[in-house]
Amino acid sequence: MKLPAPFALMLLLYSSVFSPSAFAVSSVDFEIKGVSGAIEDNVNSYLSTISTPKGNNYSYFESKVRKNIIESIQVFGFYQSETTVNLTLDDDELIVFIDIKLGDRIKLAKVNIRINGEANNDPAFSELLSTVSLKSGTYLSHQDYDQFKAGITKLALARGYFDGKWVQSEVRVSIKKNSADVDLIFDSKQRYVFGDSVLSNQTKSETVVSELATFQLGQAYESHLVAEYSLALFNSRYFQSASVVPDINARKDGKVPIVITVINHPSNTYEVGVGYLSDVGFRGTLGWKKPWINNRGDSVSAEFEYSTVQQEFTFNYDIPIEDPITNIAKIQFGYQRKDNEDTESKLFTLQLQRQFELESKWLRTWFVKFEQEDFTQASQVGSSIMVLPGVSFARTKQRGGVDPYWGNQQLFNFEVASRYWGADINMAKIHSRTKYLRSVDRTHFFTTRVDLGAIYVDEIESVPASMRFFAGGSQSIRGYQYETVTPVDAADAYIGGRYLTVGSFEYGYQFAEKWRIGLFVDAGTSTNDFSEPISIGVGTGIRWMTPIGPVKVDFAVPVNSDTDTKYTFHLYIGPEL
Protein backbone atom coordinates (compact mmCIF):
# COMPACT_ATOMS: atom_id res chain seq x y z
CA MET A 1 0.00 0.00 0.00
CA LYS A 2 1.35 3.39 -0.96
CA LEU A 3 1.41 5.98 1.86
CA PRO A 4 0.35 9.55 1.21
CA ALA A 5 3.27 11.91 0.68
CA PRO A 6 2.88 13.76 4.03
CA PHE A 7 2.92 10.48 6.01
CA ALA A 8 5.92 9.19 4.06
CA LEU A 9 7.87 12.38 4.81
CA MET A 10 7.03 12.15 8.54
CA LEU A 11 8.19 8.51 8.65
CA LEU A 12 11.46 9.45 6.94
CA LEU A 13 12.11 12.25 9.39
CA TYR A 14 11.33 10.00 12.37
CA SER A 15 13.63 7.23 11.17
CA SER A 16 16.46 9.62 10.37
CA VAL A 17 16.20 11.59 13.61
CA PHE A 18 15.12 9.06 16.23
CA SER A 19 16.73 5.81 15.08
CA PRO A 20 19.60 4.60 17.37
CA SER A 21 22.15 4.77 14.54
CA ALA A 22 21.42 8.45 14.03
CA PHE A 23 22.30 9.15 17.65
CA ALA A 24 25.50 7.03 17.80
CA VAL A 25 28.09 8.94 19.90
CA SER A 26 31.83 8.28 19.56
CA SER A 27 33.08 10.81 22.14
CA VAL A 28 31.90 13.13 24.93
CA ASP A 29 33.31 16.57 25.70
CA PHE A 30 32.48 18.30 29.00
CA GLU A 31 32.49 22.10 29.14
CA ILE A 32 32.43 23.20 32.81
CA LYS A 33 31.74 26.67 34.23
CA GLY A 34 31.51 27.92 37.79
CA VAL A 35 34.35 25.93 39.42
CA SER A 36 38.12 25.88 39.17
CA GLY A 37 41.26 24.44 40.74
CA ALA A 38 40.94 21.31 42.86
CA ILE A 39 37.12 21.32 42.67
CA GLU A 40 37.15 21.39 38.86
CA ASP A 41 39.76 18.61 38.81
CA ASN A 42 37.57 16.47 41.08
CA VAL A 43 34.48 17.11 38.94
CA ASN A 44 36.39 16.03 35.84
CA SER A 45 37.67 12.95 37.66
CA TYR A 46 34.13 11.88 38.62
CA LEU A 47 32.76 12.60 35.12
CA SER A 48 35.53 10.52 33.49
CA THR A 49 34.00 7.38 35.03
CA ILE A 50 30.74 7.77 33.09
CA SER A 51 30.44 5.57 30.00
CA THR A 52 29.65 7.07 26.59
CA PRO A 53 25.85 6.85 26.02
CA LYS A 54 24.59 4.11 23.71
CA GLY A 55 21.69 4.73 21.39
CA ASN A 56 19.47 7.64 22.39
CA ASN A 57 19.22 7.03 26.13
CA TYR A 58 20.34 10.54 27.09
CA SER A 59 18.09 10.93 30.11
CA TYR A 60 19.97 8.21 31.97
CA PHE A 61 23.32 9.72 30.89
CA GLU A 62 22.25 13.17 32.10
CA SER A 63 21.12 11.78 35.46
CA LYS A 64 24.55 10.12 35.92
CA VAL A 65 26.25 13.44 35.11
CA ARG A 66 24.18 15.27 37.73
CA LYS A 67 24.72 12.55 40.35
CA ASN A 68 28.49 12.50 39.86
CA ILE A 69 28.74 16.29 39.96
CA ILE A 70 26.83 16.42 43.26
CA GLU A 71 29.10 13.75 44.79
CA SER A 72 32.30 15.40 43.53
CA ILE A 73 31.29 18.78 44.99
CA GLN A 74 30.11 17.40 48.32
CA VAL A 75 33.65 16.13 48.89
CA PHE A 76 34.57 19.78 49.53
CA GLY A 77 31.55 20.48 51.76
CA PHE A 78 29.17 22.06 49.19
CA TYR A 79 25.74 20.52 49.82
CA GLN A 80 23.55 23.33 48.41
CA SER A 81 24.86 23.58 44.88
CA GLU A 82 22.78 24.14 41.74
CA THR A 83 23.79 22.54 38.46
CA THR A 84 22.53 23.20 34.92
CA VAL A 85 23.25 20.54 32.29
CA ASN A 86 22.64 20.96 28.53
CA LEU A 87 23.46 18.37 25.86
CA THR A 88 24.36 19.19 22.25
CA LEU A 89 25.17 16.70 19.50
CA ASP A 90 27.79 17.85 17.00
CA ASP A 91 28.10 15.11 14.34
CA ASP A 92 29.13 12.09 16.45
CA GLU A 93 30.47 14.14 19.41
CA LEU A 94 28.27 14.83 22.41
CA ILE A 95 29.03 18.20 24.03
CA VAL A 96 27.89 18.56 27.63
CA PHE A 97 27.61 22.14 28.89
CA ILE A 98 27.70 22.29 32.71
CA ASP A 99 27.14 25.41 34.82
CA ILE A 100 27.69 24.96 38.57
CA LYS A 101 26.68 27.36 41.34
CA LEU A 102 28.35 26.08 44.50
CA GLY A 103 26.22 27.83 47.11
CA ASP A 104 27.17 27.96 50.78
CA ARG A 105 29.82 25.64 52.16
CA ILE A 106 29.19 23.49 55.21
CA LYS A 107 31.10 24.48 58.36
CA LEU A 108 32.17 22.16 61.13
CA ALA A 109 30.33 22.66 64.42
CA LYS A 110 31.25 19.92 66.90
CA VAL A 111 34.46 17.94 66.33
CA ASN A 112 35.14 15.04 68.67
CA ILE A 113 38.43 13.21 68.04
CA ARG A 114 39.75 10.77 70.65
CA ILE A 115 42.42 8.08 70.83
CA ASN A 116 41.84 5.40 73.45
CA GLY A 117 44.10 2.54 74.49
CA GLU A 118 47.89 2.52 74.79
CA ALA A 119 48.24 4.83 71.76
CA ASN A 120 46.81 7.64 73.89
CA ASN A 121 50.30 8.01 75.41
CA ASP A 122 52.21 7.40 72.17
CA PRO A 123 54.12 10.54 71.02
CA ALA A 124 53.63 9.58 67.37
CA PHE A 125 49.85 9.81 67.75
CA SER A 126 50.13 13.08 69.67
CA GLU A 127 52.15 14.52 66.80
CA LEU A 128 49.58 13.37 64.23
CA LEU A 129 46.71 14.81 66.27
CA SER A 130 48.51 18.17 66.41
CA THR A 131 48.36 18.43 62.60
CA VAL A 132 44.63 17.63 62.16
CA SER A 133 42.75 20.22 60.08
CA LEU A 134 39.28 19.10 61.25
CA LYS A 135 38.45 21.85 63.75
CA SER A 136 35.27 23.60 64.83
CA GLY A 137 34.60 26.66 62.67
CA THR A 138 36.54 25.41 59.62
CA TYR A 139 34.95 24.24 56.40
CA LEU A 140 33.97 20.60 55.97
CA SER A 141 36.25 18.58 53.68
CA HIS A 142 35.49 14.90 53.30
CA GLN A 143 38.91 14.54 51.73
CA ASP A 144 40.59 15.84 54.91
CA TYR A 145 38.34 13.57 56.98
CA ASP A 146 39.22 10.46 54.96
CA GLN A 147 42.94 11.30 54.91
CA PHE A 148 43.09 11.82 58.68
CA LYS A 149 41.16 8.63 59.36
CA ALA A 150 43.42 6.67 57.00
CA GLY A 151 46.46 8.27 58.66
CA ILE A 152 45.38 7.02 62.10
CA THR A 153 44.79 3.51 60.74
CA LYS A 154 48.13 3.48 58.92
CA LEU A 155 50.02 4.76 61.96
CA ALA A 156 48.39 2.14 64.18
CA LEU A 157 49.57 -0.68 61.92
CA ALA A 158 53.04 0.88 61.64
CA ARG A 159 53.37 1.14 65.44
CA GLY A 160 52.10 -2.35 66.26
CA TYR A 161 48.51 -1.68 67.37
CA PHE A 162 47.19 -4.62 65.39
CA ASP A 163 43.97 -4.99 67.45
CA GLY A 164 42.99 -1.35 67.03
CA LYS A 165 39.56 -0.47 65.62
CA TRP A 166 37.27 2.50 65.07
CA VAL A 167 34.64 2.70 67.77
CA GLN A 168 32.93 5.59 65.99
CA SER A 169 33.64 7.37 62.71
CA GLU A 170 30.95 9.50 61.14
CA VAL A 171 30.11 12.90 59.69
CA ARG A 172 26.59 14.21 60.34
CA VAL A 173 25.56 16.98 57.96
CA SER A 174 22.65 19.37 58.58
CA ILE A 175 21.82 21.23 55.39
CA LYS A 176 19.22 23.28 57.25
CA LYS A 177 21.82 24.57 59.72
CA ASN A 178 24.59 24.55 57.11
CA SER A 179 26.81 22.71 59.59
CA ALA A 180 28.30 19.30 60.31
CA ASP A 181 29.42 17.34 63.35
CA VAL A 182 32.36 14.92 63.29
CA ASP A 183 32.98 11.99 65.63
CA LEU A 184 36.24 10.01 65.34
CA ILE A 185 37.00 7.64 68.21
CA PHE A 186 39.76 5.07 67.77
CA ASP A 187 40.57 2.35 70.31
CA SER A 188 44.15 1.19 69.75
CA LYS A 189 44.11 -1.45 72.50
CA GLN A 190 47.59 -2.84 73.31
CA ARG A 191 50.81 -2.31 71.38
CA TYR A 192 52.60 -5.46 70.25
CA VAL A 193 56.33 -6.11 70.59
CA PHE A 194 58.66 -8.08 68.34
CA GLY A 195 58.37 -11.81 68.90
CA ASP A 196 60.59 -14.59 67.61
CA SER A 197 62.18 -14.20 64.16
CA VAL A 198 61.61 -17.29 62.05
CA LEU A 199 63.46 -18.24 58.85
CA SER A 200 60.89 -19.64 56.43
CA ASN A 201 63.47 -21.55 54.39
CA GLN A 202 66.69 -23.43 55.06
CA THR A 203 69.86 -21.43 54.45
CA LYS A 204 73.46 -21.61 55.57
CA SER A 205 73.34 -17.87 56.22
CA GLU A 206 71.53 -17.92 59.59
CA THR A 207 74.45 -16.19 61.29
CA VAL A 208 74.45 -13.37 58.74
CA VAL A 209 70.66 -12.99 58.95
CA SER A 210 70.88 -12.68 62.73
CA GLU A 211 73.72 -10.13 62.63
CA LEU A 212 71.80 -7.81 60.31
CA ALA A 213 68.70 -7.60 62.55
CA THR A 214 67.58 -4.03 63.25
CA PHE A 215 65.48 -4.88 66.34
CA GLN A 216 65.54 -7.13 69.38
CA LEU A 217 63.11 -9.61 70.89
CA GLY A 218 60.63 -7.77 73.11
CA GLN A 219 61.25 -4.34 71.53
CA ALA A 220 58.13 -2.29 70.68
CA TYR A 221 57.05 -2.97 67.10
CA GLU A 222 57.86 -0.37 64.43
CA SER A 223 57.33 -1.06 60.75
CA HIS A 224 60.29 1.04 59.62
CA LEU A 225 62.63 -1.30 61.53
CA VAL A 226 61.15 -4.22 59.58
CA ALA A 227 61.69 -2.36 56.29
CA GLU A 228 65.27 -1.46 57.25
CA TYR A 229 65.97 -5.11 58.11
CA SER A 230 64.66 -6.26 54.75
CA LEU A 231 66.71 -3.60 52.94
CA ALA A 232 69.86 -4.52 54.88
CA LEU A 233 69.49 -8.17 53.86
CA PHE A 234 68.88 -7.22 50.23
CA ASN A 235 71.82 -4.79 50.12
CA SER A 236 74.21 -7.34 51.55
CA ARG A 237 76.33 -9.31 49.15
CA TYR A 238 74.74 -12.57 50.25
CA PHE A 239 71.15 -12.54 48.97
CA GLN A 240 69.53 -11.87 45.61
CA SER A 241 66.17 -11.31 47.32
CA ALA A 242 64.99 -10.88 50.91
CA SER A 243 61.68 -10.39 52.65
CA VAL A 244 60.91 -9.55 56.29
CA VAL A 245 57.21 -9.40 57.29
CA PRO A 246 55.24 -9.59 60.56
CA ASP A 247 52.96 -12.61 60.87
CA ILE A 248 50.01 -10.63 62.21
CA ASN A 249 47.65 -13.63 62.13
CA ALA A 250 49.98 -15.49 64.52
CA ARG A 251 50.22 -12.68 67.08
CA LYS A 252 49.76 -13.86 70.65
CA ASP A 253 50.36 -12.67 74.19
CA GLY A 254 51.37 -9.20 73.01
CA LYS A 255 54.04 -10.50 70.62
CA VAL A 256 54.06 -10.64 66.84
CA PRO A 257 56.46 -13.14 65.18
CA ILE A 258 58.60 -12.01 62.25
CA VAL A 259 58.96 -14.22 59.17
CA ILE A 260 62.20 -13.91 57.19
CA THR A 261 62.61 -15.30 53.67
CA VAL A 262 65.92 -15.06 51.82
CA ILE A 263 67.15 -16.45 48.53
CA ASN A 264 70.91 -16.84 48.38
CA HIS A 265 73.00 -15.47 45.57
CA PRO A 266 74.43 -18.14 43.27
CA SER A 267 77.62 -19.71 44.58
CA ASN A 268 79.59 -17.82 41.95
CA THR A 269 78.70 -14.66 40.04
CA TYR A 270 80.53 -12.99 37.17
CA GLU A 271 80.56 -9.48 35.75
CA VAL A 272 81.90 -8.32 32.39
CA GLY A 273 82.46 -4.74 31.23
CA VAL A 274 83.81 -3.29 27.98
CA GLY A 275 84.63 0.15 26.64
CA TYR A 276 86.79 2.04 24.20
CA LEU A 277 88.83 5.20 24.68
CA SER A 278 90.83 6.80 21.90
CA ASP A 279 93.75 7.41 24.28
CA VAL A 280 94.07 3.89 25.71
CA GLY A 281 92.14 1.79 23.16
CA PHE A 282 89.98 -1.16 24.20
CA ARG A 283 89.15 -1.57 27.89
CA GLY A 284 87.68 -4.65 29.47
CA THR A 285 86.93 -5.91 32.98
CA LEU A 286 86.10 -9.36 34.29
CA GLY A 287 84.88 -9.79 37.85
CA TRP A 288 84.16 -12.87 39.98
CA LYS A 289 82.48 -13.09 43.38
CA LYS A 290 81.80 -15.93 45.77
CA PRO A 291 79.31 -14.48 48.31
CA TRP A 292 80.39 -16.75 51.15
CA ILE A 293 82.74 -19.59 51.79
CA ASN A 294 81.60 -20.46 55.33
CA ASN A 295 78.68 -19.98 57.72
CA ARG A 296 80.33 -16.90 59.24
CA GLY A 297 79.88 -15.07 55.94
CA ASP A 298 83.46 -14.74 54.70
CA SER A 299 83.55 -13.97 50.98
CA VAL A 300 86.07 -13.71 48.18
CA SER A 301 86.17 -11.75 44.95
CA ALA A 302 88.56 -11.01 42.15
CA GLU A 303 88.71 -8.56 39.27
CA PHE A 304 90.87 -8.32 36.19
CA GLU A 305 91.10 -5.11 34.15
CA TYR A 306 92.78 -4.86 30.76
CA SER A 307 93.70 -2.03 28.44
CA THR A 308 96.60 -1.56 26.06
CA VAL A 309 98.41 0.68 28.56
CA GLN A 310 97.50 -1.00 31.87
CA GLN A 311 96.64 -4.44 33.21
CA GLU A 312 95.51 -4.97 36.79
CA PHE A 313 94.48 -7.94 38.93
CA THR A 314 92.92 -7.63 42.40
CA PHE A 315 91.90 -10.36 44.86
CA ASN A 316 89.82 -9.61 48.00
CA TYR A 317 89.01 -11.67 51.08
CA ASP A 318 86.27 -10.10 53.24
CA ILE A 319 85.61 -11.04 56.87
CA PRO A 320 82.44 -9.73 58.58
CA ILE A 321 83.12 -8.48 62.11
CA GLU A 322 79.71 -7.46 63.46
CA ASP A 323 77.71 -6.16 60.52
CA PRO A 324 78.62 -7.88 57.22
CA ILE A 325 77.71 -4.73 55.27
CA THR A 326 79.26 -1.89 57.23
CA ASN A 327 81.70 -3.52 59.64
CA ILE A 328 84.22 -5.78 57.94
CA ALA A 329 87.90 -6.61 57.70
CA LYS A 330 89.47 -7.04 54.28
CA ILE A 331 92.64 -8.59 52.94
CA GLN A 332 93.54 -7.45 49.45
CA PHE A 333 96.25 -8.57 47.07
CA GLY A 334 96.94 -6.79 43.80
CA TYR A 335 99.26 -6.67 40.81
CA GLN A 336 99.45 -3.84 38.29
CA ARG A 337 101.46 -3.56 35.11
CA LYS A 338 101.58 -0.22 33.30
CA ASP A 339 103.20 0.84 30.03
CA ASN A 340 101.99 4.29 29.01
CA GLU A 341 103.94 7.07 27.32
CA ASP A 342 107.00 7.61 29.56
CA THR A 343 105.84 5.32 32.38
CA GLU A 344 106.67 1.64 32.85
CA SER A 345 105.77 0.03 36.14
CA LYS A 346 105.24 -3.32 37.85
CA LEU A 347 103.52 -3.01 41.22
CA PHE A 348 102.72 -5.68 43.84
CA THR A 349 100.38 -4.70 46.70
CA LEU A 350 99.23 -6.37 49.92
CA GLN A 351 96.65 -4.39 51.89
CA LEU A 352 94.94 -4.94 55.24
CA GLN A 353 91.74 -2.95 55.80
CA ARG A 354 89.20 -2.36 58.55
CA GLN A 355 85.98 -0.80 57.28
CA PHE A 356 83.29 0.69 59.48
CA GLU A 357 80.26 2.85 58.63
CA LEU A 358 79.85 5.84 60.95
CA GLU A 359 76.49 7.18 62.11
CA SER A 360 76.91 10.00 59.58
CA LYS A 361 76.94 7.30 56.83
CA TRP A 362 80.60 7.93 56.02
CA LEU A 363 82.51 4.70 55.37
CA ARG A 364 85.77 4.95 57.29
CA THR A 365 88.59 2.60 56.34
CA TRP A 366 91.82 2.18 58.28
CA PHE A 367 94.47 0.44 56.21
CA VAL A 368 98.07 -0.61 55.94
CA LYS A 369 99.54 -1.13 52.45
CA PHE A 370 102.73 -3.01 51.62
CA GLU A 371 103.92 -2.11 48.11
CA GLN A 372 106.87 -3.22 46.03
CA GLU A 373 107.34 -1.46 42.71
CA ASP A 374 109.87 -1.53 39.87
CA PHE A 375 109.44 1.44 37.55
CA THR A 376 110.87 3.56 34.79
CA GLN A 377 109.64 7.15 34.69
CA ALA A 378 111.14 9.17 31.86
CA SER A 379 114.93 8.74 32.30
CA GLN A 380 114.59 7.58 35.91
CA VAL A 381 114.84 3.86 36.74
CA GLY A 382 113.91 2.88 40.27
CA SER A 383 112.73 0.23 42.69
CA SER A 384 110.90 0.91 45.94
CA ILE A 385 109.39 -0.75 48.99
CA MET A 386 106.64 1.20 50.76
CA VAL A 387 104.77 0.59 54.02
CA LEU A 388 101.78 2.94 54.00
CA PRO A 389 99.37 3.16 56.92
CA GLY A 390 96.45 5.49 56.31
CA VAL A 391 92.75 6.22 56.48
CA SER A 392 90.05 6.96 53.94
CA PHE A 393 86.52 8.31 54.18
CA ALA A 394 83.92 7.74 51.49
CA ARG A 395 80.24 8.55 51.16
CA THR A 396 77.78 8.30 48.29
CA LYS A 397 74.19 9.55 48.47
CA GLN A 398 71.84 9.48 45.52
CA ARG A 399 68.22 9.37 44.44
CA GLY A 400 66.94 7.70 41.30
CA GLY A 401 68.56 4.25 41.26
CA VAL A 402 70.75 3.43 38.25
CA ASP A 403 69.75 6.74 36.63
CA PRO A 404 70.09 9.22 39.52
CA TYR A 405 68.70 12.73 39.33
CA TRP A 406 70.33 13.89 42.58
CA GLY A 407 73.47 12.81 44.37
CA ASN A 408 76.74 13.51 46.15
CA GLN A 409 79.95 11.49 46.08
CA GLN A 410 82.89 12.30 48.33
CA LEU A 411 86.20 10.53 48.84
CA PHE A 412 89.13 11.50 51.04
CA ASN A 413 92.32 9.46 51.34
CA PHE A 414 95.39 10.05 53.51
CA GLU A 415 98.48 7.80 53.69
CA VAL A 416 101.94 8.26 55.05
CA ALA A 417 105.30 6.51 54.66
CA SER A 418 108.31 6.68 56.96
CA ARG A 419 111.71 5.10 57.18
CA TYR A 420 110.90 4.36 60.83
CA TRP A 421 108.57 1.52 59.80
CA GLY A 422 110.40 0.21 56.78
CA ALA A 423 109.57 2.51 53.85
CA ASP A 424 112.26 3.83 51.51
CA ILE A 425 111.26 7.48 52.00
CA ASN A 426 109.42 9.85 54.31
CA MET A 427 106.25 11.00 52.58
CA ALA A 428 102.60 11.95 53.12
CA LYS A 429 99.92 11.92 50.42
CA ILE A 430 96.43 13.42 50.43
CA HIS A 431 93.87 12.89 47.67
CA SER A 432 90.21 13.90 47.57
CA ARG A 433 87.40 13.74 45.03
CA THR A 434 84.01 15.43 45.26
CA LYS A 435 81.16 15.08 42.78
CA TYR A 436 77.70 16.64 42.82
CA LEU A 437 74.69 15.87 40.63
CA ARG A 438 71.57 18.03 40.55
CA SER A 439 68.63 18.28 38.14
CA VAL A 440 65.70 20.53 37.33
CA ASP A 441 62.40 18.85 36.35
CA ARG A 442 64.32 15.63 35.62
CA THR A 443 65.18 17.30 32.29
CA HIS A 444 68.17 19.56 32.96
CA PHE A 445 71.12 17.85 34.69
CA PHE A 446 74.16 19.58 36.21
CA THR A 447 77.25 17.65 37.28
CA THR A 448 80.35 19.09 38.92
CA ARG A 449 83.54 17.28 39.90
CA VAL A 450 86.65 18.43 41.78
CA ASP A 451 89.87 16.40 42.27
CA LEU A 452 92.56 17.68 44.60
CA GLY A 453 95.78 16.03 45.68
CA ALA A 454 99.14 16.77 47.25
CA ILE A 455 102.31 14.81 48.07
CA TYR A 456 104.52 16.14 50.85
CA VAL A 457 108.04 14.95 50.07
CA ASP A 458 111.48 16.46 49.57
CA GLU A 459 111.89 15.38 45.92
CA ILE A 460 109.18 14.05 43.60
CA GLU A 461 111.79 11.76 42.00
CA SER A 462 111.92 9.76 45.24
CA VAL A 463 108.22 8.88 44.97
CA PRO A 464 107.31 5.65 43.12
CA ALA A 465 105.77 6.26 39.70
CA SER A 466 102.37 4.79 40.67
CA MET A 467 101.95 7.32 43.48
CA ARG A 468 102.67 10.48 41.49
CA PHE A 469 99.85 12.60 40.08
CA PHE A 470 98.93 12.63 36.39
CA ALA A 471 95.92 14.28 34.72
CA GLY A 472 94.19 13.80 31.38
CA GLY A 473 91.82 11.11 30.13
CA SER A 474 88.17 10.10 30.35
CA GLN A 475 87.97 10.40 34.15
CA SER A 476 90.09 13.55 34.35
CA ILE A 477 90.51 16.22 31.67
CA ARG A 478 88.75 15.01 28.53
CA GLY A 479 90.34 16.20 25.31
CA TYR A 480 93.83 15.19 26.51
CA GLN A 481 95.43 11.80 26.21
CA TYR A 482 95.52 9.55 29.26
CA GLU A 483 97.94 10.93 31.91
CA THR A 484 99.62 13.44 29.58
CA VAL A 485 98.88 16.54 31.67
CA THR A 486 101.89 16.45 33.98
CA PRO A 487 105.29 18.11 34.45
CA VAL A 488 108.08 17.20 32.02
CA ASP A 489 111.85 17.01 32.30
CA ALA A 490 114.50 18.64 30.11
CA ALA A 491 113.79 16.08 27.38
CA ASP A 492 110.01 16.82 27.50
CA ALA A 493 109.33 13.41 29.03
CA TYR A 494 106.53 13.06 31.57
CA ILE A 495 107.74 12.79 35.16
CA GLY A 496 104.54 13.07 37.24
CA GLY A 497 103.45 15.79 39.63
CA ARG A 498 103.40 16.60 43.30
CA TYR A 499 100.05 18.40 43.17
CA LEU A 500 96.76 17.70 41.38
CA THR A 501 93.96 20.16 40.69
CA VAL A 502 91.13 19.20 38.30
CA GLY A 503 87.62 20.58 37.97
CA SER A 504 84.74 19.67 35.68
CA PHE A 505 81.28 21.00 34.86
CA GLU A 506 78.74 19.21 32.68
CA TYR A 507 75.23 20.13 31.54
CA GLY A 508 72.90 17.40 30.35
CA TYR A 509 69.58 17.80 28.56
CA GLN A 510 67.15 14.89 28.40
CA PHE A 511 65.48 15.13 24.99
CA ALA A 512 63.85 11.67 25.04
CA GLU A 513 62.84 9.14 27.68
CA LYS A 514 66.14 7.24 27.63
CA TRP A 515 68.41 9.72 25.86
CA ARG A 516 70.40 12.68 27.08
CA ILE A 517 72.90 15.01 25.41
CA GLY A 518 75.76 16.55 27.36
CA LEU A 519 78.03 19.59 27.09
CA PHE A 520 81.10 19.74 29.32
CA VAL A 521 84.27 21.60 30.16
CA ASP A 522 87.18 20.10 32.14
CA ALA A 523 90.16 22.03 33.42
CA GLY A 524 93.15 21.45 35.67
CA THR A 525 96.76 20.49 36.01
CA SER A 526 99.24 18.10 37.57
CA THR A 527 102.23 20.13 38.66
CA ASN A 528 105.22 20.52 40.93
CA ASP A 529 105.24 24.30 41.20
CA PHE A 530 102.08 25.55 39.39
CA SER A 531 104.18 27.18 36.69
CA GLU A 532 102.31 25.39 33.85
CA PRO A 533 99.16 26.86 32.27
CA ILE A 534 95.83 25.28 33.18
CA SER A 535 94.84 22.64 30.62
CA ILE A 536 91.25 22.99 29.36
CA GLY A 537 89.17 20.51 27.41
CA VAL A 538 85.65 20.96 26.05
CA GLY A 539 83.29 18.56 24.36
CA THR A 540 79.90 17.02 23.91
CA GLY A 541 78.47 13.59 24.45
CA ILE A 542 75.41 11.38 24.27
CA ARG A 543 74.05 9.26 27.09
CA TRP A 544 71.75 6.25 26.70
CA MET A 545 70.03 5.24 29.94
CA THR A 546 69.88 1.45 30.25
CA PRO A 547 68.72 -0.85 33.10
CA ILE A 548 72.38 -1.47 34.02
CA GLY A 549 73.42 2.19 33.94
CA PRO A 550 74.18 4.86 31.35
CA VAL A 551 76.14 4.13 28.18
CA LYS A 552 78.26 7.22 27.52
CA VAL A 553 79.89 8.43 24.32
CA ASP A 554 82.03 11.58 24.61
CA PHE A 555 83.93 13.61 22.01
CA ALA A 556 86.34 16.20 23.40
CA VAL A 557 89.01 18.60 22.12
CA PRO A 558 91.87 20.31 23.96
CA VAL A 559 91.67 24.09 24.10
CA ASN A 560 95.29 24.98 24.84
CA SER A 561 97.26 21.82 24.10
CA ASP A 562 100.74 22.03 22.59
CA THR A 563 100.67 18.31 21.70
CA ASP A 564 99.64 16.63 18.48
CA THR A 565 96.32 15.52 19.99
CA LYS A 566 93.38 16.93 18.00
CA TYR A 567 90.56 15.22 19.87
CA THR A 568 89.72 12.28 22.12
CA PHE A 569 86.85 9.82 21.91
CA HIS A 570 85.43 7.93 24.89
CA LEU A 571 82.90 5.08 25.00
CA TYR A 572 82.16 3.53 28.37
CA ILE A 573 79.43 2.16 30.65
CA GLY A 574 79.28 3.27 34.23
CA PRO A 575 77.22 4.96 36.94
CA GLU A 576 77.01 8.70 37.33
CA LEU A 577 78.11 8.37 40.96
Image (cartoon, grey):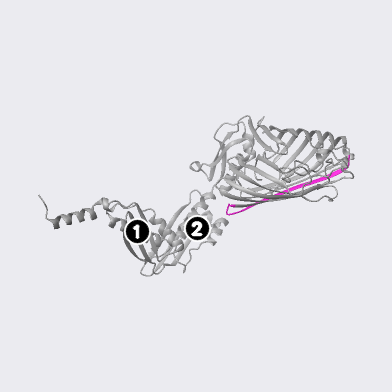
The residue carrying mark 1 is 95
Q: Is residue 222 visible?
A: no
Residue drawn at x 12%, y 53% is 3
Residue drawn at x 66%, y 40% is 571
Magenta region's main secondary structure? strand
Which amino acid does the dot numbered 1 rest on?
A: Ile
The residue carrying mark 2 is 115
First in sequence: mark 2 vs mark 1: 1
Inspect the magenta stretch and tell me whether residue 430 lies in it.
yes
Query: From this viewpoint, which residue is outermost toward the left?
Result: 1
Which amino acid does the dot numbered 2 rest on?
A: Ile
Between 261 and 188, the one nearer to me in the picture: 261
Q: Is residue 34 left or right of residue 213?
A: left
**Counting other residues with Cα less than 10 Å from the Cα at mark 2, is it few (<14), some (14-19), or many (20 or more)?**
many
* Tags 2 and 1 touching, CB below 8 Å: no
Between 105 and 400, the one nearer to me in the picture: 400
Extent of the magenta region: 425-443
| Snapshot quadrant of residue 546 | top right
- Quadrant assignment for the C terminus: top right
